[in-house]
Image: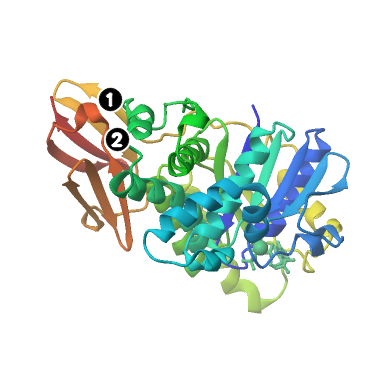
Amino acid sequence: MNRILVFTGKGGVGKTSVAAAHARHSALEGKKTLIVSTDMAHNLGDIFEIPLGKTIQQVSENLDVLEIDPNHVMAHDFQDMRRAMANLIGSIGVPDGQLDHLSVFPGMDELFSLLKIMDLHESGQYERIIVDCAPTGETLSLLKFPELLSWYMEKFFPVGKVAMRVLSPISRTVFKVQLPDREAMTDIEKMYVMLMKLQNLLKDRQTTSIRLVSMPEKMVVEETKRNYMYMNLYNFQVDGLYINRILPEDIDNPFFHEWLNIQHQYITELEEVFSEMPIYRIPWFDTDLNGLSGIDRIDREALNGRDVFALQEDLKGERYVKNEAGYLLSIFLPCVEKGEVHLHESGTDLIIKIGNFKRSIPLPASLRSHGVTSAKLDEKTLCVQFES
Ligand SMILES: Nc1ncnc2c1ncn2[C@@H]1O[C@H](COP(=O)(O)OP(=O)(O)OP(=O)(O)O)[C@@H](O)[C@H]1O
Ligand SMILES: [Mg+2]
């Protein structure tokens, strides 16, 4: 099964270095691997020590690199999506000429990066695609944008028949989109189907997973936990944690004693919170890691000897189960307090609000007439009961 691994975390924690180490590790296992960067501040070229352009380049046996330029991708790979966007945006009054610059519509850059990744995955030429992302907030908007945009399209655009066909099964995560006859679809319908395919791919736990990179200090740990919670709120699978920049135990310098205590405390906390998944400890090296020799140190000292690409089959995602009282929707939701979770129904959606994030889950057609009778947060799981 071909995989897509997305590396994210707070700014500067080591995402690019750790992602690059996985790419090298994978290529050395003899698997055809691509590392792509969706961060506009690309720096894969520095690490792999070659100048990179807008197209895929081979850096070593089994390993290719691509720094995605979303504007280039839109102009070269997705002309019909561009046209569909022009129709959509034209209907809200943006002149077509301005579309050449994606920033006219927030989230679009990210969308084209994801579409490119989907294309490369579907081409089947790579067994593993490693994605090096921008810091946390941007990655989250990257990943949730397809769901958000398709939600708007369902509400405001004529995607009716196509939507009915792709939305009917009880859980969106299990359906396989069957493309209706492409000729018969409008551009907007094609775009909608593409968005559904993209969501399907990002939420397919056999293929796509998120790896969080962290460091043992307060602010970073807090953000890592928040990130973990939000990834689960949107039903993305997180299946690995990297604790980077761990100080050596034998530092003979009193200046570091308190730092060692602080690190112990936060390593313990991270190990508790992420106990359900593999955790990798990466030492704080004596120099920075620019270049191949640096990332190979991560591979040697933290990844080697471990099956870093193994599927974590028993991690839980969102699911509907029939029970005596009707149907139960359960969503794994770690690192959140009861009082922070706000739930309500709106039309055909169930809305979950936590902090500044709001997810609208379109209810399966078969549940739309069933009211919610109770909701509780139990054992890191949000359980929403629908009447029978
Ligand atoms: N374990 C480590 N020991 C020493 N230096 C490290 C370690 N991990 C990362 N670095 C250095 O820290 C800097 C930031 O690392 P990196 O670019 O991988 O982080 P990033 O999370 O991708 O940053 P950004 O958010 O800017 O994309 C780099 O100079 C890298 O060489
Ligand atoms: Mg980076």
Farthest residue, direction bottom: 255
On the image, which quarter does residue 311 sit in? Answer: top right
On the rendering, which quadrant does ligand 1 occupy?
Answer: bottom right
Please state which of residues 175 and 134 is positioned toward the viewer in this rendering.
Answer: 175
Note whether 73 is above or below 355 in the view shown.
above
Q: Residues within 10 Å of mark 2 (few under 14, many from 20)?
A: many
In this rendered view, identify the residue nearer to me: 22 or 145: 145
How far apart marks 2 and 1 lie (CA) works out to 8 Å
The residue shown at (57%, 55%) is 8
Q: Which residue is mark 2?
A: 330
Residue drawn 46% across and 63% down? 223
Percent of width and height locating residue 343: 20, 49
Q: Which mark is residue 334?
A: none
Q: Mark on residue 321?
A: 1
In the image, residue 108 lies at what x, y percent? 51, 58
At horizontal 49% and vertical 26% (from top left) the residue drawn is 181
Q: Is residue 374 left or right of residue 189?
A: left
Q: Which residue type does callout 2 highlight?
A: Ser
Q: Is residue 147 above or below residue 358?
A: above
Q: Amino acid at mark 1?
A: Val
Disc 2 and disc 1 in contact, CB within 8 angstroms: yes
Secondary structure type for disc 2: strand
Q: Position of residue 78 (x, y in %)?
A: 61, 48
Side of 364 relative to 277 (left or right): left
Quarter-wise, where is residue 386 in the image? top left
Tell which circle, 2 or 1, labels the residue nearer the N-terminal end: 1
Residue 227 seen in the figure: yes
